[in-house]
Amino acid sequence: MTIQTDYGTVEYEENDLLVFTDGIFGFPKLTRFLLLRMNDDDDSILLMLSVEDDSVAFVLFDPFALSPDYSPVLTPEELSCLGAKDSEELSYYVICVVQTDYMENTVNLKCPLVINPETRHGIQVILANSHYEFRHKLRSFPSIGDQTDVPE
């Protein structure tokens, strides 16, 4: 199969897709997505493109690359939904809200996308009882902030 993107035509197989049976927040009808690497050597920033509506795409960050102490806790029901016994079996990504001024970009650590890499099924969760917020500015993370400092 192929899909046209801003980066050109991308070929993929059905087993390359991520499936979010219940969609993701704000997009409940879009359930099938393709992950595209922004850099061939780095999985810390990805583009998640809907194959059902190619005008919908999300920039994803590996939250552990931003904050090594990120510690999401899933409920037993969420683990069961993903077919996992332990949250360490799963992959986590956070959605970046891209602003015109890139210094204002934020990520949502409160509602990560959680994916079982074996089944390629995912869910978006709300981390209850956590200190994470819906909007963390990218520049607030040392791994990013150091790169965005501009000398006066």
Image: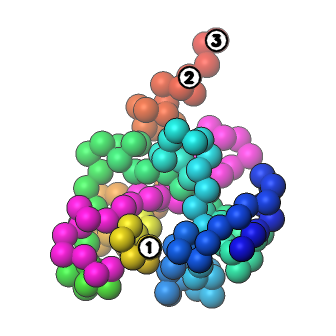
Residue appearing at x 36%, y 61% in the figure: 91
Disc with the residue nearer the chain's start (2 vs 1)? 1
- In the displayed structure, would residue 139 be above or below residue 111? above
The numbered dot on residue 73 is none
Quickly name the residue at label 3.
Answer: 152
| Snapshot quadrant of residue 17 | bottom right
Q: Where, quadrant-wise, is the C terminus in this rendering?
A: top right
Check whether the beta carbons of the residues at disc 2 and disc 1 lie within 8 A of each other: no
Distance in Å between CA atoms under marks 2 and 1 = 37 Å
**Is residue 64 visible in the rendered structure shown here?**
yes
Task: Kindly state the secondary structure of the residue where label 2 is placed.
Answer: loop
Q: Is residue 33 visible?
A: no
Based on the displayed image, in which of its 4 quarters is residue 113 positioned? bottom left
Q: Is residue 103 magenta?
A: yes
Q: Horizontally, is 48 left or right of 79 in the view?
A: right
In the image, is 90 to the left or to the right of 134? Answer: left
Which segment did they paint magenta? 82-109
Pinpoint residue 115: horizontal percent, then vertical percent: 40, 69
Q: Secondary structure at mark 3?
A: loop
- Kindly identify the residue that appears in the image at 55 percent across and 69 percent down: 16
Residue 143 coordinates in the image, percent (x, y): 43, 32
**Residue on which the image places disc 2:** 149
Helix, strand or loop at label 1? It is loop
Up/down of 90 relative to 81, above or below: above
Residue situated in front as seen by the camera: 65 or 85: 85
Label 2 crowd bin: few (<14), some (14–19), many (20+), radius 10 Å: few
Q: Indicate which label's residue lies in the foreground, 2 or 3.
A: 2
**Which residue is labeled 1 in the image?**
120
Q: In the image, what residue type sits under mark 2?
A: Asp
What is the x, y in percent for residue 151?
61, 13
Q: Callout 1, which amino acid?
A: Arg
